[in-house]
Image (tube, grey):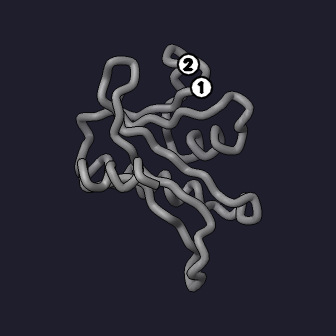
Amino acid sequence: MARDIELWDRYGFGHWAVSAELEPAVIGFGGIGRMTWREREILNVYYRFSPSVWGNGYACEVLRAAIKLWQRWLPDLPLVVRTRPANVAARRVAEKSGLERRTDLDCEHVIYALGW
């Protein structure tokens, strides 16, 4: 949580707590974090939800919101999703949301990006 607060204090944006409409309980977290990766400033998109709400499209909503913010405010920085190879659901979210699969950037993570 301290890292998330630092992002907001430093850049004015960061990760969000997510709740379903008309439900106050937090069901997950997501958002954009600015960071240096591969010696380049990037916007790293993060989304993680409770397994009880998987399959309801919340991760896609977070990623689409992140893309809109990126397009409007910071299009000069690459927008990147880094996920583990076995995380098929996260990979589908990135693909469904229009991020480009970047095998040339893969490392311990599978990489999807816009604006690289």
Residue 100 appears in view: yes
Assign a secondary structure to mark 1: loop
Residue 106's disc number: 2
In the rendered view, would you say 103 is above or below 112?
above
Image position, residue 21 (x, y; %): 56, 79
Q: Residue at x 42, y 39 (%)?
A: 44
In the rendered view, would you say 111 is above or below 33?
above
The amino acid marked with disc number 2 is Asp
Residue 55 appears in view: no
Dot 2 alpha-carbon crowd within 10 angstroms: few under 14, some 14 to 19, many 20 or more: some
The residue tagged 1 is: 109
Residue 23 appears in which quarter of the rendering? bottom right
Residue 77's disc number: none
Dot 1 alpha-carbon crowd within 10 angstroms: few under 14, some 14 to 19, many 20 or more: some
Q: Residue at x 63, y 60 (%)?
A: 57
Give the quadrant of the C terminus: top left
Image position, residue 89 (x, y; %): 70, 44
The amino acid marked with disc number 1 is His
Tag 1 near tag 2, CB within 8 Å: yes
